[in-house]
Amino acid sequence: MRRIEPSGNYYPNKLSRIYILAIEEVMGKNGLNAILNLAGLSHLIDNYPPDDFDKEFDFADFSALNWALEEMYGPRGGRGLQLRAGRAAFALGLPGFGPLAGVGDLAFKVLPLSAKLKAGLPALAKIFTQFSDQVSKVEDKGEYYTYTMDPCPCCWGRTADRPICFPGMGVIEEGLHWVSGGKKFRVDQILCHAVDGSVCTYAIYKEPIG
């Protein structure tokens, strides 16, 4: 593959480990190993990042994983796998991070849906801002919230003709599902650095689907 230049921005090992385990859950061990080989990350086969908060996993390597999924399975298949891996990553471990701890307790569960979203989305963003070099920001735009990642590890060093940050979308979708007690929401990526050099931004519509 064309090696993606190191970014100097990092995820903590724990977050990267969760995502790699999520790909393994979605694809199986052999599927994951094929992706690691294609991404130029064969040193991670049977040698996942440690389960700690040291910031050592470069955004370029995270981006290479997503590139490899699309390269191997095509744009549509790669998109589906990245979404599933993003959802699985949230389910596998993100609720255990500090900023989301209060979001799962009983007092939170009895809040109205609008209040759950208003508290839950910034709590999710705070995890990435606090534990990684991905600064995440949530803004209320009336009909929807925007969730911005800058810099973005999903598409680091890549160019595309359409938004491609599907792992982040999967994490947000599963996070909303968890925060809301099982509801689904429409999430669209409206800006992508890989397309035009802008920040990567999702629109999260406040009304649940169905």
Image: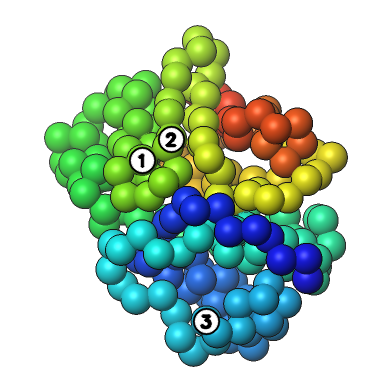
Residue type at tag 3: Leu
Residue nearest the observer in this picture, 207 or 27: 27
Which residue is situated farthest in the left direction here? 107
**Residue depicted at 56% across the width and 43% down the height:** 152
- Relative to 34, residue 59 above or below: above
Quadrant in the rendering for residue 63: bottom right
Quarter the C terminus occupies: top right
Instruction: Tell me the tag on residue 136.
Output: 2
In space, the residues marked 1 and 2 are separated at their CA atoms by 6 Å
- Relative to 31, residue 108 above or below: above
Task: Please say whether residue 180 is visible from this viewpoint.
Answer: no
Q: Earlier in the sequence, mark 1 or mark 2?
A: 1
Q: How is the image coloured?
A: rainbow
- Relative to 108, residue 71 above or below: below
Residue type at tag 2: Ser
Quadrant in the rendering for residue 192: top right
**Residue 31: x %, y % from top left:** 66, 81
In space, the residues marked 2 and 3 are separated at their CA atoms by 27 Å
Instruction: Tell me the tag on residue 129.
Output: 1
What residue is shown with label 3? 44
Task: Please say whether residue 53 is visible from this viewpoint.
Answer: yes
**Residue depicted at 25% across the width and 27% down the height:** 111
Residue type at tag 1: Thr
Q: Residues within 10 Å of mark 2 (few under 14, many from 20)?
A: many
Quarter the N terminus occupies: bottom right
In space, the residues marked 1 and 3 are separated at their CA atoms by 25 Å
Q: Earlier in the sequence, mark 1 or mark 3?
A: 3
Q: Check contact, mark 1 vs mark 2: CB within 8 A.
A: yes
